[in-house]
Amino acid sequence: MVRIRSRSIMKRASIILLLLAWGVALPSPASADLNVFACEPEWATLAREVGGEKVNAYSATHAQQDPHHIRAKPSLIARIRRADLVFCSGADLEVGWLPLLMQRGARAGVQPGTTGYIMAAEHVPVLEKPTVIDRSLGDIHPGGNPHVHLNPENIMIIASVLGKRMIAIDPENAAYYRKRLAAFNASWRRAIEDWDNRVTKLAGMPVIVHHKSFSYLFDWMGLNQIATLEVKPGIPPTASHLNGLLRKVRSSNVRAIVRAPYDPSDGSNWLSSKTGIRQIELPYTVKRNAGPGALFNLFERTIELLEGANAGS
Ligand SMILES: [Zn+2]
């Protein structure tokens, strides 16, 4: 029995080798039609929401990585080479590494300005746009805040852009993408209605953040972001800046010092120990390989944590 089985496996293996020798492409296990190279996990997950089994989405970064700063590794060049769609935040979030990957590996169909190139920030209103751009100060948000995914209304806008692009690139599966996008939009709209009811109760809640990673979230929720631990976006806290904050928070009712999982904790530890204000780490994004439902859970968990901080529980 075992011998017969192993013989059939060998037979199958030799057929595969023969096909490979002839240059016949074997179907990938997922039989996906469209390869998405996402810069951040939230966009890979959104691609899986809209694209389902027709899409193979890869995220260049994971939830514990600061998307401002990663290395343009050869493995990422190999990944972007296969991409039919490059899907990132834009607004300079990936300026330190994406242009290099694009230059080294990306095909013509995913270059800037083509259907296969989506920068989320180009499709939603960008917050904190400076009136004067001055990179010399080390500001890593020279074109405004790039962390656009934490407003659920933005997610819906970008999902629709994504759906249209998927249909344009892979028209054979147009009906499939259209159906999934409609289903996602309907359930996301219901979720927003529920979240809107909850976040109304948090309006005006004063918070301090390490980096301006959550501006879109707080803008949507109506929270009052009174200061950042960073001197400017990308410039770490200094002793004099932190001492200045100490005076500021003593005169206001700050409910939480908020940071992302990849932010250094020393600044928030210091301020928390001096003031007794709780520090909370918000998830910021989803797991790298997260499937459908993860974006919903991201907002659920984030709101829960802020509700807890507001209630002092
Ligand atoms: Zn940033």
Image (spheres, rainbow, N blue to C red):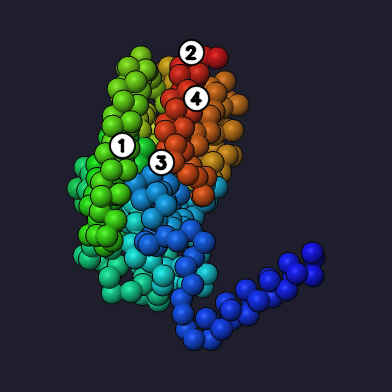
Amino acid residing under circle 2: Ala
Query: Residue tagged by mark 3?
Result: 213
Going 47% across and 68% down the picture, which residue do you hit? 27
Q: Amino acid at mark 1?
A: Ala
Residue 306 vertical position relative to residue 76 in the rendered view, above or below = above
Looking at the image, the residue that sits furthest to the bottom is 22
Amino acid type of the residue tagged 3 in the rendering:
Ser
Is residue 289 visible in this depiction of the protein?
yes
Compare marks 3 and 4 and give the one earlier in the sequence: 3
Q: Earlier in the sequence, mark 1 or mark 4?
A: 1
Q: CA distance from mark 1 to mark 4?
A: 28 Å
Position of residue 262 in the picture relative to residue 201 (left or right): right
Instruction: Classify 10 Å Cα crowding around label 3: few (below 14), some (14-19), many (20 and above).
Output: many
Find numbered disc 1 in the image and state the secondary structure of the residue it sits on.
helix
Callout 4 crowding tier (Cα within 10 Å): few <14, some 14–19, many ≥20: some
Residue identifier under label 2? 311
Nearest to the eye among marks 2 and 1: give it: 1
Vertical order, 248 against 23 (above or below)? above
Of discs 4 and 2, which sits in the foreground? 4
Q: Are marks 3 and 4 in contact (CB under 8 Å)?
A: no
Q: Is mark 3 within 8 Å of ligand 1?
A: yes
What residue is shown with label 4? Answer: 305
- Label placed on residue 183: 1
